[in-house]
Image (spheres, coloured by chain):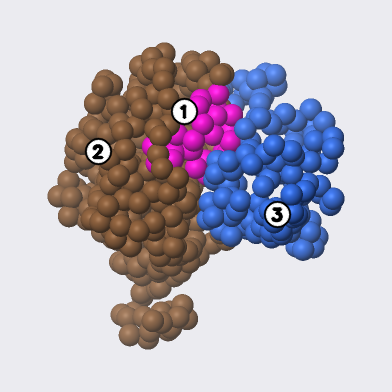
Chain colours: A brown, B blue
Amino acid sequence: MYTQTDVIKDTTADGPEGELVINMGPQHPATHGVLHLVITLDGETIKKIEPHLGYIHRSIEKMTESLTYRQFTYVTSRMDYLSAHINNLACAMTVEKAMQIEVPERAKVIRVLMNELTRIASHELWIGAMAMDLGAFTPFFYAFRERELITDIMEETCGARLTMNYMVPGGVMYDIHPSFQQKVKEFVTQFKHKVTEYEDLVTNNVIFQSRTKGVGFLSKEDAISYGCSGPVARASGVSCDIRKLYPYEVYDKVQFDEVLDTAGDSFARYMVRVREMNQSIRIIEQLIDSIPEGEFQAKTKAVLKPPKGEFYTRVETARGELGVYLVSEGGTTPYRIKYRSPGFSNLSALDHMARGSKIGDLMATMGTLDLVIPDIDR
Amino acid sequence: MFLKEYIKDVVGGVTSLLKGMRKTGYYFFHPKEIITEQYPDNRATLKLAERFRGEVVMAHDANNEHACTGCTACELACPNGTIKIITKFDMTPEGKKKKAIDTFIYHLELCTMCNLCVEACPTGAISMAQNFEHSVYDRNKLTKKLNKPGSKVREGVE
């Protein structure tokens, strides 16, 4: 292992003339994230990008080995904090799969509704942050206005705005708030009306288009070989939506399209996310009026003890495919948990995508990857 | 040819910019549609959701009695070691020893508000409160004793 100063010293001593190594990040933990990229430049052209990870590593996988099956779901909210619900769902589903718990129909519908609201909230935040990376400050506030409605709904039903811990093995923690359905309907109406504002502000903006079109190209073959998933891979034409390919909960009963694009550049990734929000709205509209009556949580034992064996679940988070691999020894705590996080694989393609482009384009490439650093480091 | 494209680019850029400016200008002249909350100034009218999880509290009634039996279910359910329960043995009128709660120690600085302790409590003794302004100058103040001095278990709660 070498320190930051060593990196600079080594490459400037040995590298050819005109090459420059700069450190991008790590920034303050309160800002975008603590990603540290060591970029080798030839003039303004990027020759190599080396991400340095581990600044926000909390050893979540090791931590879960000492937590019981009821406790370990809450930690995963801290991985990909923007899709906390979906992470919790993946963990809850793994335990349910292992223990063969039948989840009530009502809980399943509530889970899908919450998942789609989370997905919209995550994409909203991403649009704001991405536009801000490219120098547009106003869309950030517009995106957060709609996101605020979702966090209010979450706060009312789940009791928290970001780290909800609402999905528990066997169902959901509480029943939905009496005003949940009405609030969601209000949100859907407002979202449909306001989403056109993004088109005026961001999508149709000439500066935004010229900064993203053709930038950070990723071909279909490369997207597959780097293991990309989620909107990053779908913008390159890889059909990889887990909701469609391996439906879980009630995704097989609702109508929605898998959003695909073939351009593979930053603008395609942007468009995929915007269209995905509309698909999420479509799913919500289908389910919001038909939440079945019944229990919101299955009857489970106080202490969960899955049988000995290995279990794997995959879900589609806002960023891509999240896999939870659980090894159980039959005790009250997991023997081993491995998370396959979407952010890590998507980041691995960054070097390939940005090589040969100008350093100014790196912001667009990195922004459209939608990296959440705690998800990469865990 | 080059000049024509250049002018086209400039005109297109300015048009798209003005389109965006029209949107922002609309909100400039319609301040009622702005949804920002003036947080520290609106403390008196601030209304949080009833399920909002701010901190763990133990409800006491008028007789200074609570419903906590000291069963340590919450302590076992907590993933962070936030709760520590010190138990004692009370003498019942029949002269038998009975386990009871002495002190309910709650470390607010370790708490992640995951609600697992409230879910685990068999008697409904603890609940989540809406207070979210927890900052203090001394971190020792974050370690709290939830049962009030002199309080005891309500009759009939097992």
Category of crowding for the residue at label 2, using alpha-carbon neighbours closer than 10 angstroms: few (below 14), some (14–19), many (at least 20): many
Q: Residue furthest left?
A: A221
- Name the side, left or right, on which A254 lies relative to B53: left
Report if residue A260 is visible in the image. no
Q: In this view, does B81 lie above or below A141?
A: below
**Residue at the location (39% across, 24% down)?**
A106
The type of residue carrying mark 2 is Ile
Residue B21 in the image: x percent, y percent? 56, 27
Pinpoint the chain carrying mark 3. Answer: B
Residue on which disc 2 sits: A242
Residue B126 image-quadrant placement: top right
> Does any portion of residue B102 appear in the rendered image?
yes
Of residues B4 and A65, the one nearer the viewer is: A65
Quarter location, residue A39: bottom left
Query: In this rendering, would A184 be left or right of A17?
Result: right
Q: Mark 3 points at which residue?
A: B96
Q: How far apart are marks 3 and 1 (CA)?
A: 72 Å
Q: Which amino acid does label 3 sit on?
A: Lys
